[in-house]
Amino acid sequence: MTAAVAPGSVRIFDTTLRDGEQAPGAGLTAAEKLEVARQLARLKVDVIEAGFPAASPGDFEAVRRIAQETRGGIAVAALARCRDGDPQRAVEAIAIAERPHLHVFIATSDIHLKHKLRLSRDEALAEAVRWVRYGREQLGPDAEVEFSAEDASRTDIDYLLKVYEAVVDAGATTVNIPDTVGYAIPSEFGALVGRVVDLVGDAATVSVHCHNDLGLATANTLAAVQAGARQVEVTINGLGERAGNASLEEVVMALRTRPTQFPQLASGVQTEQITAASRLVSYLTGFTIQPNKAIVGGNAFAHESGIHQDGVIKNPLTYEIMTPQSVGLAGSQLTIGKLSGRKGLQGKLRELGHDLDGDALDIIYRQAIALADSKKDVTDADLLALVEQRASEVPASVQLLGWNVTSSHGGNATGSASLNVNGEDRAAAAVGNGPVDALYSAVDLALQPVFGWHPVLTEYEIRAVSAGEDAQGQVLVRCRRSSDEGPGALVVTGHGLSTNIIEASLEGYLVAVNKLHGAEINGVAVAFVAPRVVEEPS
Amino acid sequence: MTAAVAPGSVRIFDTTLRDGEQAPGAGLTAAEKLEVARQLARLKVDVIEAGFPAASPGDFEAVRRIAQETRGGIAVAALARCRDGDPQRAVEAIAIAERPHLHVFIATSDIHLKHKLRLSRDEALAEAVRWVRYGREQLGPDAEVEFSAEDASRTDIDYLLKVYEAVVDAGATTVNIPDTVGYAIPSEFGALVGRVVDLVGDAATVSVHCHNDLGLATANTLAAVQAGARQVEVTINGLGERAGNASLEEVVMALRTRPTQFPQLASGVQTEQITAASRLVSYLTGFTIQPNKAIVGGNAFAHESGIHQDGVIKNPLTYEIMTPQSVGLAGSQLTIGKLSGRKGLQGKLRELGHDLDGDALDIIYRQAIALADSKKDVTDADLLALVEQRASEVPASVQLLGWNVTSSHGGNATGSASLNVNGEDRAAAAVGNGPVDALYSAVDLALQPVFGWHPVLTEYEIRAVSAGEDAQGQVLVRCRRSSDEGPGALVVTGHGLSTNIIEASLEGYLVAVNKLHGAEINGVAVAFVAPRVVEEPS
C-alpha cells in the first residue's frame, strides 16, 4: 500500500484540467492543457488531475502527454467511471507517470441511482469494489487508487459509509467525498467528513471535492480539513462545472494566513506562482476573473475608500492580511523603457513568473521591440499579454496577408481581406454593419469555397491590456463551424493581440479558424474535449 | 425602542450602494445610485444602505434622494464615523426617510486603535456611546440606530463585549460585527457571534458584515445566522472593497435552498428579481461577473459534461438544486421577431424583470425597431442591453455629429470626428495606431481648446451582446481628465452600444466626457463619490 499523506500537510489535488475544463466553453487543446500542467508543476501542487481519458481521443492524448512529462514527485490523475472501458483507458493513459493516480467514481445518492444510473444500491457498490480492485491490480501496490462517491452529500449516510468501507477493503487508498451539486453547508459537511474519517482511520486518506453553487465551496473544503480530510480537490480560479469548484488559491491562502485555525496543515504550494497560474488559465479558457474575486481578482489587493487608504498608508496590517508579493503580484506596474536587451527582458519576465530562454525569449523580445515603436509605454501587462498570446499558438493553415476597412457614422462598413489558405492566395470584400462584421464576412467568403464551411461567431470580447488610448487590445472570440450546429457542436476560442483592434480581431478569428480546421484534419494533435456527450448506462 | 427583527426571518441589509460602491472604479453618479435603489426596492431588501453622506456632497445628495423616494417599509441607512460632523450629516440625509436607519462605526481592534485612530480603548468606547446616544436623540425612539465595531474579528473579545454592552445601553438597537479584513473562518466566527448574541439577548439585533478576502464571506455570514445573528449586510454580486462583501444572492439562496439548516429563517427577498439586479449593478459599475460566479454567473445554471447533460435530461434534480426561474433567469433566450408592437415589447421586457411604460417604453421600442433593420435577430440579450444603456444616460454638453475612419493591415489608422460642443460645431482629424486611437485623438483635439483638458483612457472593453457577426457591441470605457492625475483623480465610466464597434466606442467615450464635464460645471447634480480621501483624526 502507498503511504498516506505526510503528517502535518494537506495534499493539493488540482482538477483544473478535468473538472475545470468541463465548464461550458472552457475546452482546451492538448497543447494548451500541457501549458497549464507545466504551470501547475511550477506551483507545486501534489496531484494534477489531467483529464477523463474515456471522454475523447483528444483527452486521452492530453492525459498521456502530461503523465509522460510530469516529474518531480507530482502525481498525475485520470478520472474514470466505474464502467467497463473507462478504467482501462485511464490506466493506459497514466501508466507511464512517475506517480500514477487512478480516480474512479460512481454515484451513490438514491436520486442519481434511480434517475441516472438505474442501478440498485447493491449493484453500485459491487461496481465500485470491482473497479477499485481492478485499478489496484493494474497499477500495483504503490500507486494511488482513489474512489469518489458522486453526490455523497445527498447520499444516505449508512449506505455511504458501507461503500467507503468496501472500497478501502478492495484497495482504495483515498476516498473522496464530493459535494457534487454544491448543496452542503460547512457545519453539516464537516460533520459528514468527520464520520468518514472515523470510519477509515489510517487505512486511507479522506478527500473532498466541493462545488460552489451556493458560494460555499471554499468554506466546505476548509471545514472538511478541520474535520480530518487530508486531500482537497480544487481548481485555479475556482473554474469548473456551473458555479465551479473550490478555488485552489482561496483554500491554500486560508491555510497559510490562518495557521492557528489549521494547526500544522500547510500545503506545499509555491504561492508566489498563484498569479501567473490564474492569468494563464483565465487567458486560455477565456473565463474572465471578476475584479472582486478573492486572491486573484484585479481589486483583491486594492484599497479604495479614503478611510482604508489612510489606514493602509499608516500601517498595511490595518487592512491587509496577506501581501500582494505572497501571491506573486509584482509590486511594480511601471513602464519598462527601451528594454535593456534580452537579458533585461528575461529578468523582468522571471519577476512576472515566466522563465523563458532561447527561441521563446527571442520571439517575445522582437515583439516587445516592435510594440515599443507603436505605443509610448511598454508595461508589465503588455509583456504578460505577449507571453500569453504565445501560449495559445496553433499550426496555421490559414494566414492573413492583408486587409483594409473604411467605416463612417450611421453607415455600414466596407472591408477586404486577403488570405493564404493551404498555400493558395484568396481575397474577398464585403460590407457589414460594422468593420469587424465586414472583415469577418470577407474572410468567410474566402474560406467557404475551400473548406465547405465558414466560422460562425458565438462570442466576442476585447479588453485593453493597459491604460492609454494607444494600448494593445486583447481579443477573445469563440467560433463554431457553419456546418456544425446544436449542443454537441465543437466551439473553439481564438485570441488576438494588437494595438489595432481590427487587426487583433482578425488575428483571433484566424486562430479560431485554424483550430477548427486542425481539429478536422489532424484529430489527435489538436483535438478538443468539448464535443463529448457521454451516455450513462441506463 | 424599535421592534427587533420579526421572529422567523433574517433582515437583509444591502450595502451595494455604500461598501459596494467604494470598490475602486465602481463609483456611480447620483442618478445611477437612484436606479440601483429602485431595483433594490423591487428586490424587497429590508434595508438599503445608501451611502456615506460625510464623504462628499454628491454622496450626501444621493442618500437624501434615496431616503426621500424609498417607501413600502424599506429602511434607508447612512454610514457615519463616530466623529463630530459625520453623524450630523448622516441624520440630515436620512431624516426624511419613511424608516431612517443610522449606522455609526468606530474601529475597536488594537491594531486600528493604535496605528489608524491613535485612540485608547476607553476613548474609542466613549466616542461610540456618544454618537449612538446622539443618533437616538435625533431620530427618536422608533428609528433604527446601528453600531459597528470595525475590525471586530481581530478585537480583544472582552473589550468588544464591553463596547457592545455600552452601546446597547446608550440606545443602539442593532450591533454589527464586521469581519473588516475578511480574516475569519466560519467555525470561529460563529462562536464569536454566539458570544455577542448571548450578551445582548433581546435588547438588540445582532448583525454581521463579512468581507471575502479568503473567499469565506458567504460562509461566515451563514455561520453567524446559525449562531443567532438576525441581520446580514450583503451586496449584489458580492461587490465591495478588495475581494468584496458577502453576496446577497448567495446568502439569500442558501437560506431558501437549505431550510432544514436554517429553520424558519427565510428572507423577504423576491428572488425572481436577482438576475435583473445583478445585471444592472454589473453594467453600471462596469464590474464583470465571472462565468463561474455562484447564482448569477453565466454558467451557474449550465451543465456541460456529458455525464451531467445526460443526468439533467433524465431528471433535473440530479444536478440542479435551484431552478433558473427562481432567480429570474427567463427560460427563453429565443429571438423575438419583428416585435409585435409596443404591447408585445412591454410584455417581453416585464418577463425579463423590467417594467417600462410611457416615454421610456417608446424609446426602447424605436431603438429595437432600428436594431431589427441592422441585425438579423433581436434577442432577449439585445433588449436588456438597450434597457441598460438607458440607465446610464447623462445630460450631454458634447454630441457626436459624424465620424469616419480608414485602417489597413500593418499600417496606422486615420479618422475624423465632428462634434457639437456646448452648441458650437467642432471637427478634427488624427492618425493613430488603430481606428479607436485615431478617433479618440480626433475627439481630444476638438475638445482641448474648449475645455482646457481632454479625456485620458484608463480602461477599455467591448463585449458582443449576443452571438453572430452582426451582434451589438457593448463598450465600457473609464476615463479621467488630462488635467487631473494621481490616486485622487476622478475616474468615470462611459457605456456605448451599437452594431458598429467604432460607433459604440465613440459613444462610450462621449458619455465619459459628458460625465467629466458635468462633474465640473454642475457639482451636485451629477457629482461623483470617487475622489474622496477621508482622513482619520490622528
Image (spheres, coloured by chain):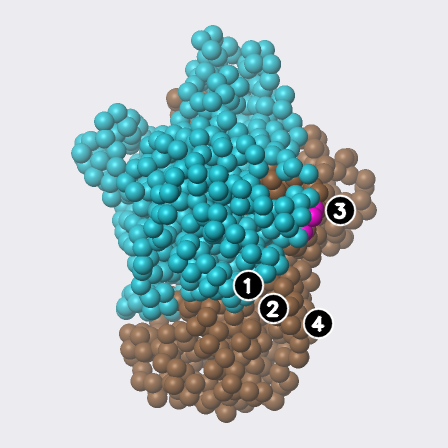
Chain colours: A brown, B cyan
What is the number of the mark on residue A348?
A: 3
Q: Earlier in the sequence, mark 4 or mark 3?
A: 4
Q: Is residue A244 left or right of residue B371?
A: right
Total marks in image = 4
Residue B114 included in the magenta stretch of the image? yes
The residue that mark 2 highlights is A261
What is the number of the mark on residue B451?
A: none
Q: Specify the quadrant of the image occupied by residue A269.
A: bottom right
* Residue at figure coordinates x 32%, y 78% from the top left: A110
Please name the amino acid that badge 3 sits on.
Lys
Task: Report, in whole angstroms, how far the alpha carbon at label 3 lies from the one at label 2.
Answer: 37 Å
Q: Is residue A477 left or right of residue B328?
A: right
Q: Nearer the viewer, residue B271 or B268?
A: B268
Q: Is residue B93 left or right of residue A369?
A: left
Disc 2 + disc 1, Cβ < 8 Å = yes
Question: SS for tag 4?
Answer: loop
Please name the amino acid that badge 2 sits on.
Gln
Residue A182 included in the magenta stretch of the image? no
Question: SS for tag 2?
Answer: loop
Disc 3 + disc 2, Cβ < 8 Å = no
The residue that mark 1 highlights is B185
Q: Earlier in the sequence, mark 3 or mark 2?
A: 2
- Image coordinates of residue A509 in percent, x first then y, are 49, 43
* Residue at figure coordinates x 35%, y 47% from the top left: B2
Task: Report, in whole angstroms, how far the alpha carbon at label 2 lies from the one at label 1.
Answer: 8 Å
Task: Report, in whole angstroms, how far the alpha carbon at label 4 lies from the one at label 1.
Answer: 33 Å
What is the number of the mark on residue A72?
A: 4
Please name the amino acid that badge 4 sits on.
Gly
